[in-house]
Every structure is written in C-alpha cells, then in structure tokens.
Image (cartoon, rainbow, N blue to C red):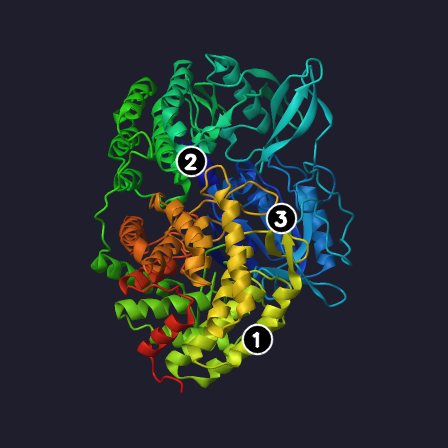
Amino acid sequence: MLSGRTALLHDYEEALSFLRDQLGGDWAVRQWRDGSCRWQFHAPLDAPDVAQGWKVHVAVAVGEAAVFARTLAPLLADLRIAFKLPASLDAIAAINAGEGGAEQVGKIATLYPADDTLARRAIHALDRVWPKSAAPAIRTSLHVRPGSAVAFRFGAFDSRHRIVDSRGIIHAAVRLPDDSLVADERIMGGKPPGGIEPPVPGFAPEVWNDVAGECAAIGDLPLVLLGEIKRTAHSRLLFAAARDSGDTLVVRQRAAGETRYPDDGTAEARIEREFRVLDAIGGDKGCAPRAIAWCGGDIPSLAMEDVEGSLLSELPQEARVRLMPSLAAALAAVHRRGWVHGDVKLENAIARDAKVALIDFELAERIGSPVSGRGTDAYMPPEVASGAPAHPAQDIHALGVSLFHAVTGFPPGLLAPRRGLLADLLRREGAGEAADVVERMTADDPMARPSAEASVFLLTALNKGALSSGAKRQPPDDTLLDVPRAHQAIEAAVRATADFRVEDKGALHWRNTHFQRHFECEAINIGAAGILIGLLAASRASGVDCRDDIAGAARWLASRPAEGQAAGLFTGNAGVALALAAAGRALGADEYMAASQARLAAAADDEREFDLFSGSAGTLFAAASISELVEDDWPLEFGRIAIAKLESRKDMVEGLTVWRAGGGPDFLGCAHGSAGIAAALGYWARRTGDRDADALSVATLKALARRAMDTPTGQGMRMRLGSDRSHTPGNWCHGTAGFLWSLLAGPGARAELAEELDWAVASLAALPAIATPTYCHGLAGQLELWQMVSAIERHEALAARKVGRIAASLDVMRHRDNGQDIWISDDPSIVTPDLWVGFMGPAAALSLAVEGERRTILDGGLLRETADRLGRGRRR
C-alpha cells in the first residue's frame, strides 16, 4: 500500500486522468511550463476566442487536490468553460507556498468564461460544490463571501493586448468600456479596473495593512504593534512593545492555510512549533531569542525577544569572518538541545557583543523528524531533496555556504548551483584555507561534515591564519586572459541562442525566460536588439557566422511599430534604432536604416523619462552613437530634441544636478540617475563639440564622486538623494562600476577627472571577481569596464590582471543547460539569451576582451568597425 506523499502524488495523477476521461474527446489539452510550475490547459474545441473577462479562481490545498479534481470533473464537463490546473502536486505546493509571488497564492484552478453570464453560472456552481478549502486565501480577487474558496478577478486571458510602460516593461492589458487599454494588474484586495462591474457581488479578501499604533494581544500578553520589519508571501515580522512593561518584542504573524503538503503542518501548527523550539533553546547562552507567547486563530502569532544587534550580513568582512566561530557555537547549542535550525545564513544571525544569536526558527525541526519546510536554496544540502530527515549535518552545510558569504561578501544564492563552485572561487581569490573549510562543511556525504563543535575549532583556526581578512588575501596576480577558453565560451553562447529562436517567414526573435517571458521583447536589456548587438560582437571575435540571425532579427525589428514603446537606450526605441542601424550597415540594407530613423524619431518625441536606461538621455546617447556608426549627421537632429528635454528638467539639489520625471526618486547611478545622464551628455559632446553638454557632464560626475567619497567606506555610490544606502560597488546599474563606466564612456579619461577616475579604480580594484555573470549586475559589465580602464596607461597593468581574473571566473561559472555550457542570469534558475541580463552579455564582453577592445559595446565607432568587418557593403 502506498503511503504519505507518494500516495497523494499517485492519487492526483489518477484524478487528472479521470478528469480527462470525463471531459471527453471534444476537448483540447495542452501542457506548458511557467517558471517552476507545469500546467494543463483544457478547452472545448468549440470554445470562443476571448481576450479578456472574469477569471474564476479556486483555492485548493495539496491534500485536497485529488478530491477536487474528481469532484469538479462532471461540473467542468457540463460548464464547458476553458480552465487550467497544475499538472503536479509539487506545482500546487509551490503556488500555495508563494514561489510564484504573493499575488498567485491559492490560485490552483482558473476558469476562463467567455462572458459575464457564464462567469456568474460558474461562480455559483463552483461555490456550491467547493465552498471552502484548507489552502491559503486568494488575496488578489473578489470572493463570493468572506472565507470562500471561490474568487474572481477581471483580467486578460492572454497577451494579445499589451501596453509598454515608460520603463519598457510590457504588461498584458485589458480594454475598458471606453476602448482604452490599461495594464492588467493583480491588486491586493481584488478591485476591478474602472468601469467594470462584477458578475456577482464580491467581497474583498482581508489583507495585511499598516499596523503602526494598533493594540493587539497574543494569548494573555497585551501589545502595541509598532511597525513591520519584513514580510513574505505567508508571514510577516513586526516590531511591538508590551503594554505593561514597554519592553520591545518581535512578533511573527502567519496567514492561515496549508502552504505545502499536509505533513508540513498548518499555519497554527508551525507557529506553535517555533514557540516550542525557542522555549526549549531560547536564552541558552543567548544563542536564540526567548519565546514569550503564542496564539492560534485566524492569524496565528508568536511573540519573542527582540534580539538587539547587527545582522552578520551587514557587517564588514573582517567582522563577519571573526564572528563565524560564534555562529558555529550558537549552532552547537541548538544541536545539543536536539534541534536542527533549517535555515542557517548570515541574514539569520545577529551579533551582540562578542556572541552570535540565531534568529528565524520558522523551519526548525527535531533531529530525526521529517523536514517539512524548505530553506534557502543555495544553502540546502543535496540529501534534503531526497527526503532525508532533519540532521545537524544539514545546518553544517549551510554554515559552510555562510562562510563563503562571510569571506567574499557575495550572496551565494545568486550563483549557479554547481558542485565545488564556492571553494573554486575562494581559491581564485587567494582564500585557500577558507576554501578547504567550505569543502569539508559542504561535503556531499553528511557524515563527512564536521560537527558544530568541531566547526568552532576549524573557524577559530581560520581566524588565526593569514587569510582571515580581505587585506591579507592575495589573489593570484599572474592570471591572463585565456583566449582559447574565451573562444569556446563565446561559441557555446552563440549556439545556445538557437534554443530560444522563434522564426516566422524569415523574421527572427528570441524567447526570454526572464520576468518578461510571456512577451516578444525588442530591447537591448531584454530582447532582440541586445542579442543582435551581442551576435555582432561575437561574430567579430570568434569568426562564427551570425549573419543570418542578424538579418532575421533586423527584419523582425523593422517590421514592428515604434508607437507604444519606451524611449530609452536599454528598454525602448533608442536602443532598437541603434541595433537596426548596425544591422543596416553590416547588411547594406536601406530599409533597416529607414526603420532606425523612425525608431529614433519616436524616442525623441517621448518625454516620460529622462534617464539613460529608459528616457531622453538614452535617446541622446543613441543619436550620437548612430551618427558615428553611419557617418552622417541626420541622427543629431533627434539628439538636439533629447538634449532640450534634459535641459528643461534639470534641477540643482545639494550641489548636484538631477533630472526629475513624474516626482519619482532622485537616483544617482548609471542606469536611472545623474551618472548615466552625464555619460550621455559627455558622449554627445565628444561627437558634436557641445561645450555646454561637456561642462555639465564633467561637473555632474565630479559632484557624484565627492558624495561617494564621503561615504563611510569611501567605496559606494549612494543610490539616491536623501539616502545613505549604497549599491554593490561592482554593479553597472547603480554602483561605482556604473559611475566609472559613465566617466569613461562619456567625457573620457581626461586630466580634470583624474582624481575621480583614480578613486573609482582604486575602490573597484579590491573587489573579488565574484558576481553574477551579467552586464547589469555582474562580471560581464565589470569585464567591459576593465577593458575600458586598460586604455589608461597608469592603470593598464592592473586592468589586464582584472580582465584575466574576471574571465577566469566567468569560465568556471558556466552552467550546463540543454547540452551547452553557458551562463545563468541574475537568478540561478533562469537561463536566457539576452544581452544585459542573460548569457549573451558575458559572451559579448569576452568578445571585446579577446579583441583587445577598449570601448563600450554601444560605442558607434566600435559598432561601425564591427559591421564593416561582417559587412556586405559599407554605406557611403
């Protein structure tokens, strides 16, 4: 006899088979995967083709899924309304656990009635046979009544109607009664768009609101809630104060409902278990918060001690490594009490005085009991996926991953899940002793890992060694660019684009698997324009013939309208114009030049945004680049329109020029702020001799550098005005790397900017060659940047070493996917071909390095030379 989860899985498969039989042969069935979830879509063969309407959702818990499918089968056959269901119980568990986002929680079955009459009939019929569920409540739809399992929301049934916002993000759209299109947004509370009346009266679901100042009670403990610390799809942490004593506390609240399999426990059971864990170990030499009170009911809640101190993840590198033995000691105390923490990481450890306390025991289990929760992916050992019971060795694996984070400062959850990668990267950074400890702690065999007590001694010895601080680590300084390996990686990436290719009558674009995966994307950031430019660079460096793909992409881009797109260089028409001009020159095709001009004109007319990524600064940069590329002045008229828009919206705040659009935040970085606009002004000035633009570019960059050098570490660009928050220095979008790129791509490495340039180079020189592989947030952007720095004689030797080390790191980060060794995106679960966030980014950056190129990939002169080398006819 089957038991437990195996029985549930088998029962659900049989129920889906029963459902298909009940529907009969005049229904079409198709399956598809969206992220981690696999779906089955069923529709009558005579179903009308409808673009939008009232979606009817049904909440279903994993343990109810088979009963639900059997119960609903006759009803669905009678209603003859298209619907979808998850194809597996794991997909149901993932949805209910919030892995698809809080707005998707509970939505297990979805029906697509063709009109309001059918929607009304379906809602009433479903509510009669499935009035309630143990699943979490659906929060972005109206409910038939409070607490009902059936809910409904007006929305798009597919993506045939779409709108692109000013930032270039594509949204499915719905058409309102006045014939206007609005984005189809899943709003907490389920309110429909204006002018749309629900088919039946609906009740808004309860959602968590601001709690500041509210009085509450947990058991017999009266509290005043002070504010929210953080929230997930199913729980939130709050600051609170005991009304009697005034002592500050931390409160966890969980939304009701079963989020995964039945043996994972209800929300109330999980809160009670966390209380029991903390009651057993809390206060034991300060290794965990003390449990104070808990309650069940509609909002199960837990009150616990407010552990004051700093998260280990927020401390400087030397302090993080120094406190690792204390983290192991806290873990040893937990294990001695018979528990496994289940989610050990620096973000769940607080330094107070010289000791460390573990927090967030939500996933803790008794040693030997089934592992019911799911910890942080990068930290979970392989045996957990195989169903191994809770064991202290699982925490030791997470401790080893945390040591990597402590030494490098880089979140390991952003790296590809490749065996041995963490130790390999540490050794490349000269941290061989730390690599040895990480290898022992993350051994595949749980019994080969040291105990928590032994880990205390290992980490103490590491602290006493020469590699305990970043200043003492000496990365290899003889790493040079391995050109043959780079060629292999470039060619593999080009081959891998074929897996994403979508062709239609000679036109070509590529699927993406990022957050825009439901749409056909055009832009440089995500889309065909960026991949086209990446293929141009790759064909120049590797000799791979990409001409057919470049021609197909240009044909596709030229066929699409400029209207309704964003403006900017990375997200809209300006970037598409640049790609079309490059293809037009390479292929000798006048039609692509004409399409480029139309796109640039549309970008110049757009005044919604002003930054480099999405707005007028991007148009300005593109105009100068295209002018250089085509060796003609026609693009400059559109640049003059863009520069006039920038002039009209500039403002001086705290000694710094900022550009404001729609009252949004004053970003300072390259992608969305003053640095990127300064880059566009400087690049334009170099092409046109515009002295005013040049002076403003230089003054803005100098002011930004002064602000950055005033930060406590002197290494971080502040993200925005009025904030001391600094972005990761190596990131192109908002970090110091983006500032240096703006300086070099804009006004250039001139004497009056020497101090600012040298500061940026020095602050980036010490960074480890560890990041995501992408242009926007990672190593591809850094690789291009150090190639640009290599043009400066005093930094040439340093830049060559950095190029070699980054290229070597990119080599070990390649990830086997569909038979090719390529790179992940900024999310380890995503492999996508795009230039700025996908694997064509590192391929293009390596191509520039192989060629010894010292300009950005978006430079018009570089694109002209690349196009002419590929070319069938240089325009004259």
Near-viewer residue (866 or 791): 791
Q: Amino acid at mark 1?
A: Phe
Q: Quadrant of residue 195?
A: bottom right
Q: Nearer the viewer, mark 3 or mark 1?
A: 3
| Residue, disc 2 | 6
| Residue, disc 1 | 638
**Is 95 above or below relative to 748?**
above
Q: Position of residue 363 (x, y in %)?
A: 48, 27
Q: Secondary structure at mark 1?
A: helix
* Left or right of residue 468, residue 686 in this image: right
| Residue, disc 3 | 654
Residue 754 in sight from this viewpoint: yes
Q: Position of residue 420 (x, y in %)?
A: 27, 39
Residue farthest toward the front in the current orientation of the protein: 752
Neighbours of disc 3 within 10 Å: few (<14), some (14-19), many (20+): few
Q: Position of residue 785 (x, y in %)?
A: 38, 56
Residue at image coords 78%, 48%: 201
Residue 836 in sight from this viewpoint: no
* Left or right of residue 779, residue 283 in this image: right
Q: Position of residue 358 (x, y in %)?
A: 47, 23
Q: Nearer the viewer, mark 3 or mark 2?
A: 3
Disc with the residue nearer the chain's start (3 vs 2): 2
* Left or right of residue 578, residue 231 in this image: right
